[in-house]
Image (spheres, helix red, strand yellow):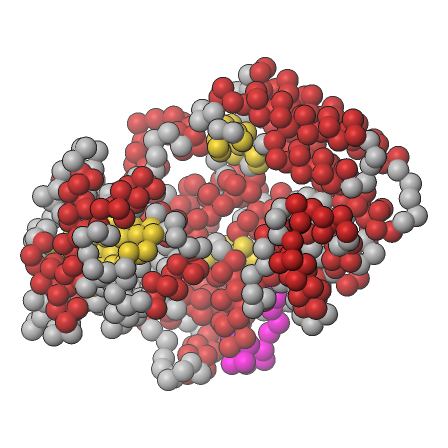
Amino acid sequence: MSESSAGAAPAEQAAIAGPSPSAALTAALDAVIGGLDGGGEARPGQRRMAAGVEAAIRDGRNLVVQAGTGTGKSLAYLVPAVLSGKRTIVATATKALQDQLAGKDLPFLASRMPGGFTWAVVKGRANYLCRQRLEEVDASTQEALDLDGLGATARTQLGRLAAWAEQTSSGDRADLDWEPLAAVWSAVSVGGEECPGASRCPAGERCFAEAARARAADADLVVANLALYGVNFRAEGMVLPPHDVVIIDEAHQLEDAISNTVGTSLWAGRFSALAARVRAVLADDRLVADLAAAGSTLASALGPFHGQRLELPLPAAVVDPLVNAGERLARTLDTLGAIKTSIEDADQRRVRAQKAATSLAEEVAVVADLPDGYVAWVEGERHEPRLSIAPLDVGPFLAGTAWKERTAVLTSATLPSVLERTVGLTAARTDRDDVGSPFDYERNGLLYCATHLVDPRHPDHADQLADELTALITAAGGRTLALFTSWKRLDAAVAAVSEQVPYRVLSQRDLPSGRLVAEFRDDESSCLFATTGLFQGIDVPGTTLSLVTVDRIPFPRPDEPLLAARRERAGPAAFATIDLPRAQTLLAQAAGRLIRRADDRGVVAVLDPRLNTARYRWELIRALPPMRRTRHRDEVEAFLAGLRDGTQGTGGDGTPGP
C-alpha cells in the first residue's frame, strides 16, 4: 500500500452506461425525489439503478446491482417496481429494514406516486400477538410466569398487552412503544410450527397474522424478510402470495439466510417445550416424561460429538435416539388425535400441541435419514448441544423456487463476486451492474493499514493492537467504532484500552444492540467496541463517528462446519471462491460504517499488515470504498486531530488533511 496512493475517482462519475429510463420512470423519480425534505433530484447512480430495474422487469431478466451508501437504492427499486404494475415482493435481510420500509419509505412513496399503489408487510407468526393465546391466559400461565421469577411484572405486562390488543390494527410487536419480556410475549404469541391456522382457531377471523396475510394477498407490493421468503418456498408457496418480481435487499446475506431456513436444529429444549404443551392437554405423566427423556437422550448422544461435523450417513449413536424420539412423537400424536373435548380452550391447546408435535416429528424424520447434499454438525453450549443441518448448496433450492418464473433483483452496498453462482442465478439470464456511490471517498476518507504491527496470528498482536487503538482513539477524541473478529479479542481490547483513554468505552456485552448504538450515537466522545454482528447495520452519521477500526481481515473461521464442507467440495479454488469473497464483503461492510452522508469525514484503520503484504491484498482493497491510502500513523493522527478540533476537514487540495 503506497503511502499516498489515491483510489479511483468516485465510481458514480463513471456510471454513465446502462439502459435509459423511460419517460414515465423519469417523471416518477422526479416527482418522488422532489417531495423529499429540501427537494432535489435523483442522483446519477440512483437513476441508473432505477433504469436497470425497469429494464429487468420489462425484459424478464435478473439483475444483480451493487449500490453504494447514499445511492438511495430503496427508491431506485421501489419506483420502477410500482410502475411495472406487477405483483412484487421485497425481501429484506432484517425485520429492522422491513420496519423502515413500512414506516418511512412506502408511506412517502404512496403519497407521491401517480395513481398510488397498495402495500403490506408480512412477518413470521411469532411477531404478532395471538388473540386466542391472550384469551387463554389463565392461572396456570400466571403460575408458570411466577415460577420464572417474573410475578407482578408479568401480570402488569399481560394487562398492557390485553389493552393494546383492543387498540392496535396490526398486532405487530414492532408497533409497541415498549418492549415486553420474552416470556410474556411467548405466552401470548404462537409460532408457525404450532399454529393450527385460521379455519381451526376460534379467533381465526380476528387473527392479526391472518389479517396481515390477507392484506398481502390484495397488495401490489409486499415486504417480507429473507427468512420468511425461504419458508414460503419450503411451504410450497403457502405463506406469501404469488408474485411476478422479487427484490432481495442486502443480498449479500441471502446464502446464509436460506441455509438457515432450509436447514434445521434439534436439541433437548425443543422436546421439553413440546412436553410442556402436551402436559397442558393430557393427564398422562408417562407420555410427557417420555417426550422430555427423548430430548435428554439425544443430548447425551450428541455430547461426544460437540464441535464436530458428522459424516453421512449419520453414526448409529445419533440415529438411534432420533428413531426413538420419532416413535415417542408418533405415540404422542396418536394420543392427541384420540382426544375429544367440547371445551374450546382445551381443544385449541390440543390442536396447537398436535401441530407442534407434527412439525417436530417431520424434522426428526428428515434428520434421521439425511439425504445427500446436506451437512450435519453439533454446536451450541456443551450442556445443551444442538444437532444442526443445512444444505451444502442453496443454489438448486433457489433456482427451483425463488427464481422460477419471476424476475429477481438482488442489491446491496457490497456484493461478492461469486454471488450469482452461490445463489443459483444463471449467467444467461442475469445482468450485473455497479452504480457506485455519490460520496467523494477520495476527498473525505482515509484508509490506513498499520503495517508496523505483527501478523494477527502472532501472540504479541493483542498488546500491539491495544497500543495502536489507544493512540488512534486519543487522536480522534473518542468517536470510534472498533470492530473485532472474536469476542476474546474484543474483551481483551476493552480491558486494555478503557484504562488508557479518557473516553467512555462501550462493549457489545453491555446492552442490547439497539440501546447500545443509541448510547454511542448520543455520546459524541464515546467509543463502541463490537464484533462481526455489528460490521453492518450501524448508521451513525456526523461527527460522533470519525474512526472505524478492524482488528484483522475478517476471514471466516476455518472450523465452521458448513463452510468447511464447501471448501472440501471446492478443492484448490476454496480460498478464492469461499474465504476471500466473504472477507471482502465483511471488510467492505465494516468500512461502510464510516461515511453515511456527504459531509462525513474520517479514517478506516485496518490493523492487520496483511492488507499491505498479502498476495490477495488488491482484491480486498478494490472491494473497499476508493479512499486515499496511507501506512503512516502520524498522518492519520494529524488528520483525526484536525477533525477532532474542528480546525480542518480537508487539506488545501481537497484531500484529507493535514
Residue located at (46% from left, 43% from top): 256
Q: Nearer the viewer, residue 529 or 23?
A: 529
Where in the figure is residue 174, as x and y percent of width and height? Answer: 57, 63
Residue at left offset 14%, top offset 38%: 454
Of 410 and 24, the residue lying toward us = 410
Residue that extends furthest to the top in the rendered view of this protein? 316
Where is residue 55 drawn, in percent x and y?
Answer: 46, 63
Considering only vertical position in the picture, is 104 above or below 436? below
Q: Position of residue 329 (x, y in %)?
A: 74, 29
Asked if residue 245 can be seen in this view, the reply is no
In percent of width and height, residue 179 lies at 56, 61
Q: Is residue 93 visible?
A: yes
Q: How many marks?
A: 0
Image side of residue 358 versus residue 488, left or right: right
**Quarter holding residue 433:** bottom left
**Magenta stretch: includes residue 157:** no
Looking at the rendering, the stretch of residues picked out in magenta corresponds to 109-121
